[in-house]
């Protein structure tokens, strides 16, 4: 029997699916649907698909490598800003769209190229998510921070840098932070030993100075003077854990094009010093490229086939990747270093290079862009390489979330037992999937990816299917040529209580939602189970919306205790209705 299930009952059913009782040993989620494979080992950990044979092989590999190298592995994590899924050549871009990427392509050929890796819809949320292993709704870092705005989210978090640093790793970061400038929020306040970079997004340094971008500011002396009084750090900064902070040169239209070159030099020096000290390292190299507006280094202007600022910047990114990889090889650390290359979200489609109407955005084959929960906003290129550990030439559509880096690096670095248990961890240990030499069947350890933005739950991906409760409409008068996402989208709820369903294999652009009755129950179960984690671990500084109630937030939310009690009493009835 097919019937619509009221949203309230779905929320109640969530408690039934989780097996919520008064018994302490019944807190673990057990799947009700026979299609679901995930197993929850601890109440604060996201359920994962177990692969015992793969796990055994991965453990043996890591043990043998440590015995050979005499230390834990190094981690080089490279983030590009706003790069489209299809910008690298191996993802269908490269020379075909005016910007060859031979170094990125080589990295993919030497390791694992993921085709279904997911970020958050925007930069600050993703950067918080991967470093904490938690949805940004749990830290409060749910949207990009603005110039002069204080952010208090990272101070209470336990970052992967902190876990590794406490156990003997040398941890360094360079480039874009964008997680707060206030006391206690710098990288070296939350786990990194060293930092050199810019604390904010590049646009706060240059968009108000560029007459092609903001003529209403540049040509108005009063506004320009007012902008100079806005309180934010306008320079590059250097800091050390427990040490002094140095403020470098001001970032402006003359110095911004040179930042990536300087950050590259710092990263090379950091890896050299760590290797000389015979210490394992975590290096987080976070580029400002290719976030709009792009001002490529003079060495790269006009070097792309397209001759546009964005494409020239992609060529610059590719060169930096090549130099970082070559440094690791020159240091003799290639076989003991996991390299990760990715973007913090999909391409931004709101923008055009000032004055010449040349697109300053990336390329992707999906619907939507940065700032949306359509695939174009959150599905990103993701490459991992590790000679001798990750099989060369692998391509997999197994699901991977950026938050999985947290648990995976913790496992590889020997600090998995230090992951905090007083909060919900959304990441999953993907070590055995990354290191397997066997055919993975396009199945990772992650069963589902969940789409959140701001205070709202939008949907879930499971296998090739995507369920959406909410969606975004781009533009005030949307049409085939409408651009936008981050600055140009409105949100709506689906017309059906059971949601909209897309088959991402047959309809990758999410043009037509269709219902396959067999996928409804498991996908609603996954959706409700994810929401339930906020009831068990109610950490939501900016609040989350559950059943039209606000849970958490500065004022404590609007979810009454009697509503929760009502949910519990109705749980079994809702679960039975779901399976009719």
Image (cartoon, rainbow, N blue to C red):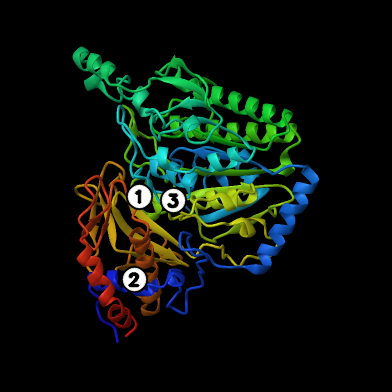
Between label 2 and label 1, give the one nearer the viewer. 2
Distance from label 2 to label 3 (Cα)? 21 Å
Q: Quadrant of the C terminus?
A: bottom left
Q: Which mark is residue 134?
A: 3
Residue drawn at (22%, 52%) of the image: 557
Residue 517's place in the image compared with 428, above or below, is below
Q: Secondary structure at mark 3?
A: loop
Percent across and percent down for residue 433 are: 62, 59
Residue furthest front in the image: 23
> Total number of numbered labels?
3
**SS category of the residue bearing label 1:** helix
Residue nearest the viewer, comparing 17 with 305: 17
Tag of residue 137: 1
Q: Is residue 449 visible?
A: yes
Q: Which residue is mark 2?
A: 15
> Residue 241: horizontal and vertical position, in percent?
53, 28
SS class, disc 2: helix
The residue lying toward the viewer, choosing from 207 and 389, is 389
Which residue is at the front of the view, 520 or 413? 413
């Amino acid at each position: 029997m097919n019937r619509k299930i009221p949203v309230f009952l779905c929320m109640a059913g969530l408690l039934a699916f989780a097996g919520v009782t008064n018994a302490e040993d019944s807190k673990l989620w057990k799947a009700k649907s026979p299609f679901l494979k995930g197993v929850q080992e601890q109440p604060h950990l996201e359920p994962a698909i177990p692969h015992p044979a793969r796990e055994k092989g991965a453990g043996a590999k890591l043990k043998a490598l440590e015995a050979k190298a005499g230390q834990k592995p190094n981690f080089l994590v490279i983030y590009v800003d706003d790069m489209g899924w299809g910008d690298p050549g191996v993802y269908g871009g490269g020379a075909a769209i005016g910007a060859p990427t031979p170094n990125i392509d080589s990295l993919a050929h030497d390791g694992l190229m993921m085709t279904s890796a997911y970020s958050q819809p925007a930069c600050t949320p993703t950067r918080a998510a991967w470093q904490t292993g938690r949805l940004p709704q749990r830290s409060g870092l749910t949207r990009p921070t603005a110039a002069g705005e204080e952010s208090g989210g990272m101070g209470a978090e336990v970052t992967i840098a902190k876990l590794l640093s406490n156990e003997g790793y040398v941890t360094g970061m360079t480039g874009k932070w964008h997680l707060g400038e206030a006391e206690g929020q710098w990288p070296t306040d939350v786990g990194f030993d060293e930092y050199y970079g810019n604390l904010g997004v590049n646009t706060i340094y240059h968009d108000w100075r560029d007459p092609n971008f903001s003529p209403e500011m540049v040509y108005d002396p009063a506004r320009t003077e007012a902008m100079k009084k806005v309180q934010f750090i306008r320079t590059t900064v250097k800091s050390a854990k427990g040490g002094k902070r140095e403020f470098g040169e001001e970032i402006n239209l003359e110095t911004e094009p040179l930042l990536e070159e300087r950050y590259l030099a710092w990263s090379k020096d950091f890896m050299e010093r760590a290797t000389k000290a015979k210490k394992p390292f975590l290096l987080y190299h976070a580029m400002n490229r290719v976030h709009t507006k792009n001002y490529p280094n003079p060495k790269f202007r006009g070097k792309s086939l397209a001759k546009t600022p964005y494409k020239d910047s992609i060529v610059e990114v590719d060169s930096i990747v090549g130099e970082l990889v070559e440094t690791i090889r020159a240091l003799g650390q290639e076989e003991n270093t996991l390299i990760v290359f990715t973007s913090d979200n999909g391409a931004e489609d709101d923008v055009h290079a000032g004055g010449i109407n040349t697109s300053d955005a990336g390329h992707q084959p999906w619907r939507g862009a940065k700032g949306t929960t359509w695939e174009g906003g959150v599905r990103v290129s993701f490459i991992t390489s590790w000679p001798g550990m990750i099989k060369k030439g692998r391509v997999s559509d197994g699901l991977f979330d950026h938050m999985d880096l947290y648990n995976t690096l913790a496992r590889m670095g020997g600090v998995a037992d230090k992951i905090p248990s007083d909060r919900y961890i959304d990441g999953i240990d993907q070590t055995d999937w990354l290191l397997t030499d066997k055919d993975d069947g396009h199945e990772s350890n992650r069963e589902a990816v969940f789409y959140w933005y701001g205070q709202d739950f939008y949907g879930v991906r499971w296998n090739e299917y995507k369920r959406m409760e909410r969606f975004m409409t781009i533009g005030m008068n949307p049409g085939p040529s409408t651009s936008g996402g981050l600055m140009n989208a409105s949100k709506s709820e689906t017309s059906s209580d059971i949601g909209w369903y897309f088959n991402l294999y047959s309809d990758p652009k999410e043009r037509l939602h269709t219902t396959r009755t067999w996928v409804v129950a498991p996908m609603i179960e996954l959706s409700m189970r994810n929401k339930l984690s906020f009831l068990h671990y109610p950490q939501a500084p900016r609040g989350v919306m559950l059943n039209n109630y606000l849970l958490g937030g500065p004022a404590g939310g609007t979810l009454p205790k009697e509503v929760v009690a009502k949910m519990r009493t109705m749980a079994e009835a809702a679960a039975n209705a779901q399976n009719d």
